[in-house]
């Protein structure tokens, strides 16, 4: 086999074995790089001491997840055995991001942490002025994340030093997405900002019509996000124009969930207790699914299926929205699925981290 194809195979395999950041990639599309078809089997469950709202990261056979008990846990992906745990300064709602042998995350005390993935030892910390729920995005040895102190930060990933920060007019709950040489971030001030990654210079500021907790998913020059104005928006990033707005005809509820987007559909959960699938080009509804509880969990697309949490972990057919599998946790799921290496990992508010996959035959 030619060297080019061997290299391509290796890169594809490595990508399929990792879920290194919230929503799976720097554009936050919420699409797994490998297929995972239901039904799934519960392989193991690990109980931290408090609820889990953080979405797990999966890297080289290890799961990393934060808990409201203030601990970051590293667990063996195959067995669920504890590898190490790290004490933060407050509750952890931020989802970990892994880059260059380091796991990065923020906590409710406003401390942003860099921890060695092998040992769980602290490398550095950075102090913001309020809690950090936003997860970090990483590119070119820089980290981008928001804080409830109403600032977006850019740090040097090696040293933890501040490169730049910009002030907004509200909390930044969402994770910033990367688009070309820009950072796209929406916040509770109701604006989507497009900033220069190098120095934070603002290139666009688009009024959205409602404050935003949802992280924007970027796909084919467009950003997609939900708002607390009960809408989902499709935005042209090159022109700054809102191409379409979607609101359910009857049920007017906020969208806290972040969307998953692929060629076929944009899929997002709503506090109206529905999962919505929309045409990415027009915003027209393709189908809705009644989840039976509000859907704050952000869906993940894996091949022909969607996985999302509500009061259960649910798998839906991407084409039709038909339910094909579910696992009853007995507790609300606010975290989102992480899918890699043939496993799906997700935490729930009952303080249990669940790992699913295909049944291992003896």
Image (cartoon, grey):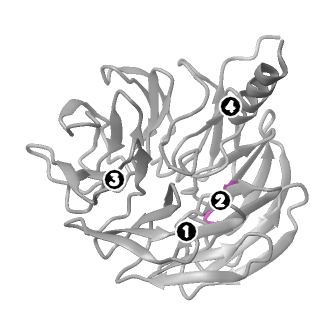
| Quarter of the rendering occupied by the C terminus | top right
On whether residue 217 falls in the magenta region, the answer is: no
N-terminal of the pair, mark 4 or mark 2, is 4
Q: Nearer the viewer, residue 127 or 11?
A: 11
Q: Is residue 304 left or right of residue 255?
A: right
Mark 4 secondary-structure assignment: helix
258 relative to 171, above or below: above
Magenta span main SS: loop
Labels 4, 2: front one = 2
Q: Nearer the viewer, residue 207 or 260?
A: 207
CB contact under 8 Å: marks 3 and 2? no
> Quadrant location of residue 19?
top right
Mark linked to residue 139:
2
Q: Is residue 251 left or right of residue 173?
A: left
Residue holding disc 1: 197
The extreme bottom residue here reads: 129
The residue at the point 38 percent across, 58 percent down is: 214
């Amino acid at each position: 086999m030619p060297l080019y194809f061997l290299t391509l195979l290796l890169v594809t395999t490595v990508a399929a074995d990792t879920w290194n950041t919230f929503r799976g990639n720097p554009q936050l599309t919420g699409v797994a790089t490998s297929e995972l078809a239901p039904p799934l089997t519960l392989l193991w469950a690990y109980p931290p001491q408090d609820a889990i709202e953080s979405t797990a990261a999966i890297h080289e056979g290890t799961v990393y997840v934060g808990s409201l008990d203030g601990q970051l846990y590293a667990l063996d992906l195959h067995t669920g055995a504890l590898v190490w745990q790290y004490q933060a300064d407050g509750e952890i709602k931020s989802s970990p991001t892994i880059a260059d042998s380091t796991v990065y995350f923020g906590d409710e005390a406003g401390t942003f942490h860099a921890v060695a993935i092998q040992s769980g030892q602290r490398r550095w910390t950075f102090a913001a002025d309020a809690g950090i729920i936003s997860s970090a995005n990483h590119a070119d040895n820089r980290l981008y994340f928001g804080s409830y102190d109403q600032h977006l930060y850019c740090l040097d990933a090696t040293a933890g030093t501040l490169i730049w920060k910009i002030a907004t007019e509200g909390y930044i709950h969402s994770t910033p997405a990367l688009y070309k040489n820009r950072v796209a971030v929406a916040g509770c001030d109701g604006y989507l900002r497009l900033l220069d990654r190098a120095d934070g210079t603002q290139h666009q500021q688009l009024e959205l019509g409602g404050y935003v907790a949802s992280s924007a998913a970027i796909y084919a020059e467009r950003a997609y996000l939900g708002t607390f104005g009960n809408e989902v928006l499709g935005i042209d990033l090159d022109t700054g124009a809102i191409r379409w707005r979607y609101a359910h005809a009857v049920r007017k509820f906020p969208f806290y969930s972040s969307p998953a987007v692929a060629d076929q559909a944009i899929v997002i959960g709503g506090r109206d207790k529905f999962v919505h699938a929309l045409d990415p080009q027009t915003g027209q509804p393709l189908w809705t699914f009644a989840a039976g509880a509000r859907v704050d969990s952000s869906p993940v697309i894996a091949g022909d299926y969607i996985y999302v949490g509500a009061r259960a972990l649910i798998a839906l057919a991407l084409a039709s929205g038909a339910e094909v599998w579910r696992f009853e946790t007995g507790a609300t799921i606010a975290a989102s699925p992480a899918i890699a290496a043939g496993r799906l990992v997700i935490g729930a508010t009952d303080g249990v981290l669940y790992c699913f996959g295909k049944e291992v035959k003896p």
